[in-house]
């Protein structure tokens, strides 16, 4: 098989790209170095419901949807100060079932999917597929010459520039049994949180970090993350610590841990016939290390551009529409890293971190001016911190404007990149 499109990686971004490419009539081969049922995220992720709409996919239903419509409590440190929001529109999604759905959609649309196959891209653009010890019958292996290559191989991407450790989030997520339901309910009641709601302790190991827990009807979901490159314990360590302190939490049912690339998205999404997608392109909402929605939406844009034989339409269209939001929130992420729990409490009191800004963050959209109004009035109460926060807001607006002017021709990229770096500062 010589495909029109070879997709490297069958996680959310790769499987969504394979589905859309095949649906649009492109001969598509999607491979993963892991078994197909081990590809991508294997845990529970929060994904904005609107991302599914934008990505041309049905919203999660049945077992795939673990929770929706629940309240989210953003707690400063270990509390008790908090901001509580409802109507944030995030769906807690069982990624194993979502990826299975995407892979089945891709197959039904005519794509060929192949697990246990590692792709190597040579420096001259040569592509080599290695099918493990016992390649399946009819498996495509050896050298290949596809028209387009989609690099959706995640953080280990072939083209991605390695990120310094201070821009890597080490996250862990597990669903566990509950040994003792009386104590479990007592713990959440003591925190003033109803079962099913998300309790998100923030800044417990550096400003960016979280320990996020939610009691489900038959177990508990735990999500942790931090930036160990700044000297903090990893998500895995934070999770183990919390479980160790709560004897009512039982053994792990499923989950996993990995790094998430933080930073601005890659400014060059197309390199010759190679297109970058998902974590491989840094299409991650850096403020909370979320890449599922962004990757699936980008997958649809990529496939539509390839079906028109116009890969640059993907690069330009995606950057102008979404790049600015991700770059802006990366500026916020770097600010959030400097905050101690007391700063967060002060920002909550001043209204800078409040219901509307928290909802915007969970929906992965820029806050509106109206959302920021409480912040300007809060300036009187917390002038120093609020002034710092408002400077970051101005930087976010400037970055969003710059990305809306992403150059249509590669010749304009170097100047544009220089302008972005000047506004954003480091990284
Ligand atoms: C614990 C944790 C919790 C998270 N929580 C959230 C959340 O709540 N919401 C959210 O939106 N995001 C969350 N994320 C981030 C999210 O999981 C990632 O952004 C997302 O999985 C990226 O998808 P992807 O398809 O780009 O890459 P991946 O999921 O990394 O998939 C890439 C695939 O490529 C394959 N591959 C790699 N190299 C090769 C090769 N050479 N040949 C063939 N195949 C290859 C890999 O095996 C893998 O299956 C979380 C991450 C972690 C670790």
Image (spheres, helix red, strand yellow):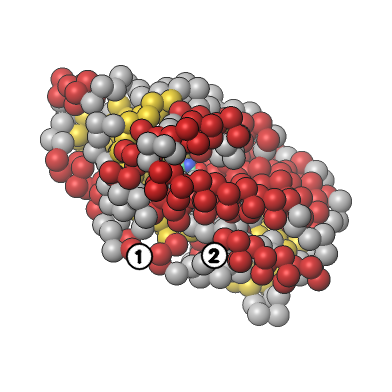
| Of the pair 250 and 315, the residue shown nearer to us | 315
State how many labels appear.
2
Residue 64 locus on image (x, y percent)? 49, 30
| 390 displayed left or right of 203 | right
Circle 1 sits on which residue?
229
Circle 2 sits on which residue?
425
Which residue occupies 44% across, 62% down? 167
Residue 213 locus on image (x, y percent)? 31, 34
| Of the pair 215 and 347, the residue shown nearer to us | 347
| 407 displayed left or right of 156 | right
| Of the pair 267 and 425, the residue shown nearer to us | 425
Among numbered discs 2 and 1, the one appearing first in the sequence = 1
Instruction: Determine crowd level at label 2: few under 14, some 14-19, many 20+ residues with C-alpha closer than 10 A.
Output: few
Is the residue at mark 1 in contact range of ligand 1, meaning its CB lies under 8 Å from it?
Answer: no
Residue 393 locus on image (x, y percent)? 54, 46
Which residue occupies 13% across, 35% down? 247
| 2 displayed left or right of 197 | right
Q: Is residue 80 above or below residue 122?
A: above
Residue 294 locus on image (x, y percent)? 60, 45
Question: Callout 1: helix, strand or loop?
Answer: helix
Q: Is residue 58 above or below residue 225?
A: above
Q: In the picture, which quadrant includes the N terminus?
A: bottom right
Which residue occupies 60% across, 34% down? 369
């Amino acid at each position: 098989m010589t495909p029109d499109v070879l997709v490297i990686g069958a996680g959310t971004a790769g499987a969504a790209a394979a589905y859309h490419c095949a649906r649009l009539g492109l001969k598509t081969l999607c491979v993963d170095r892991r078994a197909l049922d081990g590809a991508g995220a294997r845990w529970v992720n929060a994904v904005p419901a609107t991302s599914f709409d934008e990505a041309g996919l049905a919203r999660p239903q049945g077992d795939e949807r673990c929770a929706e419509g629940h309240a989210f409590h953003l707690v400063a440190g270990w509390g008790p100060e908090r901001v509580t929001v409802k109507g944030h529109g995030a769906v807690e999604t069982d990624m194993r079932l979502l990826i299975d759905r995407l892979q089945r959609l891709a197959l039904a649309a005519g794509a060929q999917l192949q697990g246990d196959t590692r792709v190597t891209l040579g420096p001259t653009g040569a592509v080599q597929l290695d099918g493990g010890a016992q390649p399946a019958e009819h498996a495509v292996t050896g050298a290949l010459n596809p028209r387009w290559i989609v690099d959706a191989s995640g953080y280990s991407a072939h083209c991605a520039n390695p990120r310094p450790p201070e821009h890597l989030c080490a996250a862990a997520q597990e669903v566990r049994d509950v040994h003792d339901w009386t104590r479990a309910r007592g713990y959440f009641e003591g925190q003033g949180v109803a079962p099913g709601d998300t309790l998100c302790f923030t800044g417990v190991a550096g400003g960016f970090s979280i320990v996020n827990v939610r009691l489900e009807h038959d177990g508990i979901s735990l999500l942790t993350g931090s930036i160990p490159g700044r000297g903090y314990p990893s998500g895995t360590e934070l999770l183990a610590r919390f479980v160790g302190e709560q004897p009512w939490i039982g053994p792990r049912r499923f989950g996993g841990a990995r790094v998430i690339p933080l930073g601005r998205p890659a400014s060059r999404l197309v390199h010759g016939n190679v297109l970058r997608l998902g974590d491989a392109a840094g299409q991650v909402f850096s403020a909370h290390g979320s890449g599922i929605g962004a990757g699936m939406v980008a997958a649809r844009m990529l496939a539509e551009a390839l079906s028109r034989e116009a890969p640059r339409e993907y690069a330009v269209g995606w950057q102008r529409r979404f790049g600015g939001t991700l770059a802006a929130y990366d500026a916020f992420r770097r600010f959030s890293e400097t905050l101690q729990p007391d700063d967060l409490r002060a920002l909550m009191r001043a209204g800078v971190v409040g219901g509307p800004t928290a909802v915007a963050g969970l929906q992965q959209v820029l806050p509106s001016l109206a959302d920021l109004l409480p912040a300007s009035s809060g300036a009187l109460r917390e002038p120093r911190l609020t002034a710092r926060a408002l400077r970051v807001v101005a930087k976010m607006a400037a970055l969003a404007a710059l990305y809306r002017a992403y150059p249509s021709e590669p010749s304009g990229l170097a100047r544009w990149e220089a302008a972005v770096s000047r506004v954003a500062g480091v990284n």
